[in-house]
Amino acid sequence: MLSRNRTPASPLVTSLAAAAIAACASHGCAQAQSDEGPPPRPKFQFVRQNEDWSRFRAPDDAGALDRLKHLALDGDGNVWLSLGGRIDARAELWDGFGFGATTPGNQDAFLLSRAITHADLHVGSRVRFWVEAKTAQVLGRDALPGRRRGLDLDTAALYQAFADVRLVDGDVDGDGALTLRVGRQTFLFGVQRLVSPLPWANTLRTWDGVSARYDAGPWSVTGFATWFVPVQKRSFNDSDDDQEFYGVYATRAPQADGRGYDVYVLGNSRPNVTVNGTTGDERRYTVGGRTWGALGAFAGGKVDGEVEGAWQFGEVGNADVSAWSIAAVLGYRPDDWSWSPRFFCGVDAASGDERQGGDVETFHQLFPLGHAYLGWADAVGRQNVFAVQAGAQLALTPSTSLQVVGHSFRLIERSDALYNVGGGVARTGLGGREVGHEVDVLVNHKIDRHVSLYGGYSHLFAGDGIAASGPSEDQRFLYLGASVVF
């Protein structure tokens, strides 16, 4: 095991990251383009290794950031390097955190910042080396439970480092291509209900191991065998041999029928867990699927829908596991309306335990981006929950969007706990099934392809069931953020 101590970064590092974002927003980060228009370029993605810069060539009058995306290292252009990075900063203001938790407190204001840089080296068409480093800082967060958590602080870390080998080239479009990946890597599957790099958290998620991806026609199939890498806030992040994560995830992109499909089998292990009174080493398997896409026209508009369901089995100690989850969303986009609105409603449900001890019926949410589905206040996880939502998305301008969503949360089983967004126990002994109701408002604004701003407000109204289990204050959450990507 490699481990070494590091001195925590000063608040100056965080301030400089925020200042860089402000300067970019003020002066603009867009690069000059030729009169013939911009060259073909891939869109920036959060998982940066999914971008393909192999065909991109910066025009003669391109700025420095464009030139970094494809640097030829030999005369034939067979060896080339792509450089990039991302800087994020977000200010958060909380009141009533944890429904009014009092240890150490429930009110605070703080600044999160994160800087990531990567190098992507291609040697011919078959070999690729990817290295990505990060630093995640927090200025403040002294008065909330957990204080400066592993979700917030990772002084200096190797985020990803892997080698790709193309075992089968496939045709010009990549059909029939097989690529092996070995090393530290992150995953984003489907719409991130179960597996996500967790972009909202400052320190992100990553795994050590091996994966292989096969692309054939509309299908993409990824198999992987890895170990989770917990964050060590001020030392090297080693993988945990007791937290295995493995499986197969297959995706069929939407075709002429407008429908897309995911099918997956996932396995994971955790040592010495306790689930509603049952304790032991856990080995759990998740089998599920998802379909999404257009459903047709209705009342002068277009209807879309999505359904995802999963079943879990395995063991916790000597007890058997049998758990489930289901999510469904129905959307409607009227034609010719101002602001191009999309209205939607949905249901998220995940099983809980009927009784303490014995066999386990509590769903394990794995590694989700629950934030996007169960409220931006991050008070509720996808375990022992029944949630309904309704909302609207509006394009106020070509570069500005508004989303307003309402949620209602209830427990599936009163004999089980209320679980938080990280899957831990938030409350036990609720006086009823009603957890609360939440309203989320989010605004996104894109300045240019490099710089974006966002902000929002969430208010979680405590339900009648919370009061019997402890403090029952409403939870209020205000945030403002900015991102620069290149």
Image: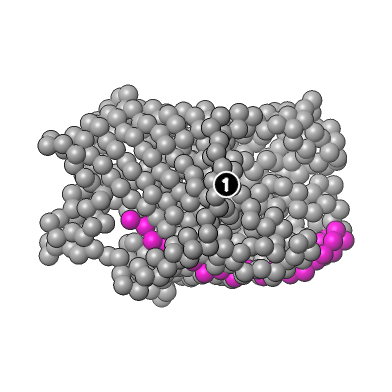
Image check: 32 left or right of 428? left
* x 40%, y 70%: residue: 22
Is 473 part of what is drawn in magenta? yes
Image check: 376 left or right of 360? left
Q: Is residue 332 visible?
A: no
Q: Is residue 24 visible?
A: yes
Is 248 or 104 nearer to us in this picture?
104
Is 346 or 283 nearer to us in this picture?
283
* x 18%, y 49%: residue: 57
Indicate the secondary structure of the residue bearing disc 1.
loop
Tell me if residue 63 comes above or below residue 266 in the rendering.
Answer: below
Give the magenta-colored segment's residue range. Answer: 464-486
> What colour scheme has been applied to the protein in the rendered image?
one colour
- Determine the image quadrant of residue 219: top left
Q: Position of residue 400 (x, y in %)?
A: 41, 71
* x 66%, y 68%: residue: 108
Report the quarter where the C terminus lies: bottom left
Q: Position of residue 465 (x, y in %)?
A: 82, 61
Q: Amino acid at mark 1?
A: Arg
Report the quarter where the N terminus lies: top right
Image check: 261 left or right of 375? left
Q: Position of residue 438 (x, y in %)?
A: 67, 66
Q: Position of residue 149 (x, y in %)?
A: 64, 53
Within-10-Å neighbours for mark 1: few <14, some 14–19, many 20+ = some
Tell me if residue 211 comes above or below residue 236 in the rendering.
Answer: above
Task: Report the residue marked by disc 1.
Answer: 234
Is 34 part of what is drawn in magenta? no
